[in-house]
Image (cartoon, rainbow, N blue to C red):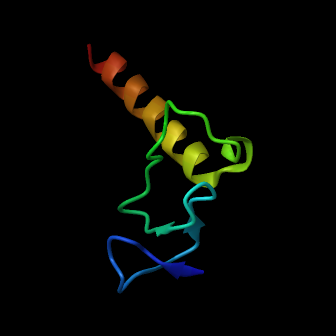
Amino acid sequence: MGTCRNHPDRESGYRCMKYGYYLCEECLCCNDLYMFCKARSSCIIYFLTSKKGKELDEITEAGN
């Protein structure tokens, strides 16, 4: 566990494997979503970020 790079008062278990920093749930996003990352296949941040994006797309499409 570490502290969020944007909120040092918050502990987090979400660590960017590429850059080595931690992010809290509020800040959770992949910073290199469309760039190569050798850790992507096992990256929890990428997985959670892409899952959120798909859910938001589905909600948007359902509203139209």
Above or below residue 6? Residue 3 is: below
Q: Position of residue 47 (x, y in %)?
A: 60, 44
Q: Quadrant of the N terminus?
A: bottom right
In-front residue for pair 46/19: 19
Q: Quadrant of the C terminus?
A: top left
Q: Quadrant of residue 17?
A: bottom right
Above or below residue 17? Residue 42 is: above
- As drawn, the residue found furthest toward the bottom would be 9
Q: Position of residue 8 (x, y in %)?
A: 36, 82
State left or right for residue 46 relative to residue 56: right
State left or right for residue 18 relative to residue 32: right
- As drawn, the residue found furthest toward the top would be 64
Instruction: Look at 43% across and 46% down and name the residue there.
Output: 31
Instruction: Look at 63% across and 53% down and name the residue there.
Output: 44
Instruction: Look at 57% across and 45% down and name the residue there.
Output: 46
Could you tell me how many numbered marks the image carries? 0
Q: Position of residue 33 (x, y in %)?
A: 49, 36
Q: Position of residue 3 (x, y in %)?
A: 46, 80
Instruction: Look at 35% across and 17% down and name the residue there.
Output: 61
In-front residue for pair 18/47: 18
Above or below residue 35? Residue 21 is: below
